[in-house]
Amino acid sequence: MKKRSQDDDNGKTFLTMRRSLVFFVSVVAVLSVTQIGFAYSNAYTRLQNEKQLLADGDMEAADTSAWTGSGGAVITKETTSPKSGKRHIRVTTATTGNPTVSQTILTIGKQYRITGFIKNTGAAYATINTGPSVNAYITVGSGWEKVDVVATAGGGTQLQLICAGATSPAYCEWDDVFVTDYVGGAKDNEKNILTDGDMEASGTASWSIGNATVTKQTSGQKGGKQSLRAAYNGVSSSGGVTRSILTIGKTYRIRGFARTGGAGSPYPAIIASGIFQWSGGTNSAWQPFDITFVCSTNGVVYLYGYGLGVGNYVEFDEVFVTEYAGRTNDIEKQVVVDGDMEKSGVAYWTGYSTAVTSKITSGQYSGKQSLRVTNPDVNIGLATQLAVVTGRRYRVTGKMRSDGTKVPCIGLGNAFCDYFGTNSTQWQNVDFVGTAIAGSFGGYVVVGSRTVVAGYVDFDDLFVTALP
Ligand SMILES: [Ca+2]
Ligand SMILES: [Ca+2]
Ligand SMILES: [Ca+2]
């Protein structure tokens, strides 16, 4: 991928470009719960790095300090039959009423996706509320019931777990409650802030045009009936269309398609926040782009062509610019304890069968220690940690390496591993998405090697996060 500064090529074009004045209109539609409905299906996909807004949503903390009680709630963590891990939360009342635990995490008017498990266990209804008297979800059955709803915070800033309508001593239970900003995923659910990003509008009047001859094309388009073409204007080797639509400080995702045609070596580029976010190749096939970035410099998005000359052009289609609320890698919840292997001892990593776990303090990948899984005999060598929920998807990143013979691998509930490295003694990158499976290792993260020779494999910086 080419990376160029804005001063390259015809940088002056940026200075002379007219910026249109755009008014930001924030339309907040506060829907009632009946309008929202319950979305059980996975009709939309989710971005991988969405952020869990709740603290202790998996209820694995030993205490209840992340949760604020009201309404006479007696709050406990229970260790019998949690939905996942070792604990779930219970709200009990000795009297009638609506005992509640809550966290102040919502913004009125914003949409959230709430997933989790919820249980009626007495003369009351377990609910999840996105504000006073707004039930995002209410249980109807017994036993752990799966919740997957999209709801708008309508009446307050508290995400509430209410044991509602208790008419006698009763309690309700929750586990694995996951609350994220709802960013959609399918394009129909996302708000495209780039007007005419699909290039289907008649003409090009909505675009600011810079140093190119811009037209709509009705053949070869990527989607719909039209694409946008920026061709050489007889003067400038770079040009295209622009929009001033971004707000400094916000995070955006821009995705779409671009291609080139004609003589020479034109190439398409997306410039935003003052830098080249993406540049493509000279290729008549539609090239996808998908960029996420923080707007830090200015709010102008450029769909531009470079290397423009007589008889050539670049084209864009299906361009979506959406505000991306979910990208917060640094505060994603790590479900593995001692993933960086810096804790003293190996209490969190249990050797399976004859395998022995240890921490090495020389040659470690990061910090002062890495985990070593050794098997002294001709056997596989695995170590485990109870950390995942069967059926849930996770992203796993980290580092691992071989002793030169044993191939390192990682499994999610899977003793046969989901992800394998090589027998290189160099640290190898781990980055995969998998679903934790049931079985004798169900619930466990498995690290080690399946190569049946004596030896060892090393691991470090394992980071396992649930994907809602
Ligand atoms: Ca739990
Ligand atoms: Ca189109
Ligand atoms: Ca380390």
Image (cartoon, rainbow, N blue to C red):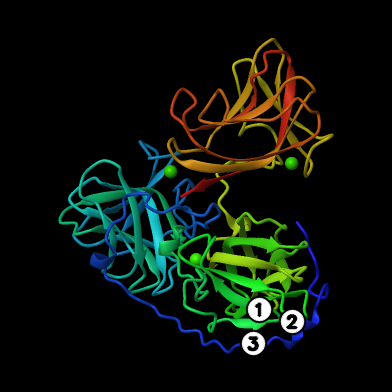
Q: Which residue corresponds to the image point at 62% horizontal and 62% vertical from the top-left? A: 258
Tell me: residue 76, above or below residue 350: below
State the image coordinates of residue 206 (x, y, percent, origin top left). 53, 82
Q: Which mark is residue 14?
A: 2
Q: Earlier in the sequence, mark 1 or mark 3?
A: 3
The picture quadrant where one finds residue 363 is top right
Q: Tell whether 343 sits left or right of 70.
A: right
Tell me: residue 212, above or below residue 416: below
Can residue 253 be seen in this snapshot?
no
Q: CA distance from mark 3 to mark 2?
A: 10 Å
- Give the total of numbered labels: 3
State the image coordinates of residue 246 (x, y, percent, origin top left). 59, 77
Q: Which residue corresponds to the image point at 62% horizontal and 66% vertical from the top-left? A: 315
Q: Which residue corresponds to the image point at 68% horizontal and 68% vertical from the top-left? A: 313
The picture quadrant where one finds residue 132 is bottom left
How would you rate the neighbour count of disc 1 (Cα within 10 Å): few for under 14, some for 14-19, many for 20 or more?
some
Q: Tell whether 299 sits left or right of 168.
A: right
SS of the residue at dot 2?
Answer: helix
Tell me: residue 237, above or below residue 362: below
Tell which quarter ligand 3 is in.
top right
Q: Which residue corresponds to the image point at 58% horizontal and 41% vertical from the top-left? A: 336
Q: In terms of depth relative to the viewer, which is nearer, 40 or 458?
A: 40
- Say which residue label 3 marks: 19
Q: Earlier in the sequence, mark 3 or mark 2?
A: 2
State the image coordinates of residue 226 (x, y, percent, origin top left). 50, 68
Q: CA distance from mark 1 to mark 3?
A: 18 Å
How would you rate the neighbour count of disc 3 (Cα within 10 Å): few for under 14, some for 14-19, many for 20 or more?
some
Q: Of tags 1 and 3, which is closer to the observer? A: 1
Q: In terms of depth relative to the viewer, which is nearer, 85 or 318?
A: 318
Tell me: residue 448, above or below residue 97: above
* Disc 2: residue Cβ within 8 A of ligand 2's nearest atom: no
- Say which residue label 1 marks: 213
